[in-house]
Image: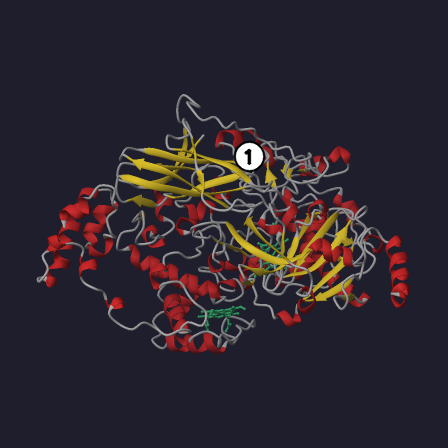
Amino acid sequence: MFRFSKTILVFALFSASTAAFAIDKYQGVGRQATPAEVKAWDIDVRPDFKGLPKGSGNVERGNELFEEKCASCHGSFGESNEVFTPLAGGTTKDDIKAGNVKGLSSGELPQRTTFTKVATISTVFDYIQRAMPWTAPKSLKADEVYAILAYLLNLQEIVPADFVLSDKNIADVQKLLPNRNGMTTDHGMWPGAPAKKGGIGNGGKPDTANKACMKNCKPEVLIGSTLPDYARTAHGELRDQNRSFGPVRGTQTLGPEAAKKAADAGTLDLATKSGCMACHGMKSKIVGPGYSEVVARYQGQTDAESRLIAKVKAGGQGVWGSIPMPPNGHLKDEDITTLVKWILSGSK
Amino acid sequence: MGDMVKQPGRLRPAPENFLSEEQVKAVGSGRRDFLRKSFLAAGAALAAPMAARAASEGDINILENPAWTTSLGMPVATNPYGMPSKFESQLLRRESPGLARVGGASVSFAPLQGLFGIITPSGLHFERHHQGWHDIDPSKHRLMVNGSDDSLLKKAKVYTLDELMRLPSVSRIHFIECGANTGLEWGNVAVPTVQYTHGMVSCSEFTGVPLKVLLEDCGVDYKKARYVLAEGADGSSMTRTIPMEMVESGEVFVAYGQNGEMLRPENGYPLRLVVPGVQGVSWVKWLRRIEVGDKPYATKDEAVHYIDLLPNGQHRQYSSIQEAKSVITTPSGGQTLLDKGFFNVSGLAWSGRGRIKQVDVSFDGGINWKTARIEGPVQNKALTRFNVDWVWDGSPAILQSRAIDETGFVQPTYGQLRKVRGTKSIYHNNAIQSWKVIESGEVSNVQVL
């Protein structure tokens, strides 16, 4: 016993100085992170700008970068609905004054964009820095993020065309965000103390208080809406999405001419799984050409199929621009053939 | 054979295979008489080659031993990783067309219409990715724990899988539901089947290490550090703020196991956060970093998405807990009952606030209710399976289920929910689901206010 007393003493001192629990309790498990490691991964930026890197960028540079790295998916003005909901648009000068986007309550807004919703500029900085461009996340330098954000803010008419955004003035821009007063945490879906006692929710109080009535609970059944006809068939053949035995069958929703459509959808699945859809749209360019553009280009060329099969397999550049398509040698030959045939037959 | 088919209380065997396309169409359009007649005809045709046997003797599947009874089967390990029967190919994860524009930032829904019990087979677990999924090499994966400030944590640490898997582990069954589950239906009925209305919920047994163990190993200061930022290792490096209350309670854990094996890549292999009762986006997949902080983070997926738009134009931020909800899965939208008579109506109930206490079912659109049986285990913040007897007399009906959790909270109607939250929210739709049954036996999605 005596041999251990020293260790016990050290341990006792140690635990007195930390709370009730001991750090480094599990021998051989975990090690201290180096400062360089923490710096490499700890890139988050908080609403109070903790974590914000130093740097700056202007609207013009942002415009160039956006055109080069972002416009293919988001449109030159952040307006595109093709790959994701629009980034920009939907706010007014009055919204900037009020800090509330009026369109959100008036119902005039056709679609919510990023800037109609976001209440914290740090969010946009943090997200572009960590996740964009979508196919090359974390490739932007801090100055580039500032420049692109300056451009987006200018599109939103929050800052003028000659604006230089930096770590020094980003807090001022925060005060101009159109929906900066648009968030509430007054709800029961966050645990812990309510806001007035230092938490951020309402203390867990739910919105509704239905009663477990069992008999004659209401005079009549009010139907709010029923399944529209188009929605009955929009999800393909429901018969084939259920077992062919058991107490029920899937309802047959498609006629025979829909068989081709269903096969097309199968190939679309394959294209999605194979990663093609990250770079190609049905109609328009994402990183590579839209499929209908490919069809238009190779119409009437009998050897197109075999050439394109070889190209998709090996990858390559120069036909549509300088961006290369990576090789797809990891895919099965028959799948590449199916995909190219599908593209050339007017993929749907 | 006619008599056998007509035996009351018996469901007929699968008729589809016997029918011509024309006939199938007729059945699909609700002429169920046709089905009866053609089954008789098909039965006769099938019986013909077996002339030796009189049809009246009984079911040919009994009278004649099939190939699998009269021949040698496959050896062990033919499939070193076993797969479902080839007859189960209909039950797949599926996307909802038009919901998302690119597969890397989309959803695939679990086929709830065909699942049993409470555990979702790992291969059918719903998927939601924001920047595609990867199959990460576990030997290169690291988990870092640090503080937004040095004063919140004594020591920033790094753990490998080798190390995490040495720590004391817990295994718990929990549901995970995307905050946007049933989000397509806030305004009106939009999708046909339970796969698309409710298929962003799944339930697994997860195995891992309570996050509390790691935070304490790093010397967290719970007084100051009231929030946790969880971050993924994928391209999106998904980040969400997690309430420290849930970490301190021991509920939140860092999981590597799912249903007895490692997590599936689509579900975060080799490491994900499990935040019981909270919407799926907070269960950060491919978890690589935990930061403790004194303020919430307002990350993109809690400041631009997963925020609930209210009628007054305000958005609710940090809405996290999934309130009590339930849905009948058999029979459900897009299915057709084959016959009148007895059915075991079955469904799922769950609550982010604890255990399910009771589930009631209505067959008349919510005028009268009957308490359902609880079919299996009732676990904390887990799917709970219920079922109830129903004898369908062939007349129209509207089926509903209503969950009550251990806090006494009763799942709301659409009318009640919309009164507070309007119709534009996208997130946290836990309204009572209704399925309408018409005379033909076809079941479809309706909303009862």
Q: Residue at x 21, y 46 (%)?
A: B26
The quadrant where residue A69 appears: bottom right
Residue B113 or residue A59, whichever sits in front: B113
The residue positioned farthest toward the front in the image shown: A1
In the rendered image, the quadrant that contains the C terminus of chain A is bottom left
Host chain of mark 1: A
- Residues A131 and B394: in front is B394
Q: Nearer the viewer, residue B154 or B60?
A: B60
Q: How many marks?
A: 1
Q: Position of residue A146 (x, y in %)?
A: 73, 56
> Viewed as shown, does residue A38 lie left or right of A82?
right
Crowd tier of the residue under label 1, counting other residues whose Cα lies within 10 Å: few below 14, some 14–19, many 20 or above: few
Query: Where in the figure is residue B95, as x and y percent of width and height?
Result: 45, 54
Q: How is the image coloured?
A: secondary structure
Residue flagged by tag 1: what amino acid is it? Answer: Gly
Determine the residue positioned at 20% across, 55% down: B18
Q: Is residue B178 above or below residue B92?
A: above
Please, which residue is most extreme toward the top here?
A219
Is the N terminus of chain A in the top left, top right, bottom left or bottom right quadrant?
bottom right
Residue A70, by quadrant, is bottom right
Q: Where B62 sits versus B307, above or below?
A: below
Q: Report which residue position mark 1 lands on.
A: A107
The residue nearer to you, when weighing A229 against B210, is B210
B108 horizontally vs A124: left or right: left
- Residue A290 showing in the rendered view: no
Residue A12 picture quarter: bottom right
Whether residue B222 is situated above or below residue B366 in the rendered picture: below
Q: Secondary structure at mark 1?
A: loop
At x 30% / y 41%, what residue is drawn?
B442
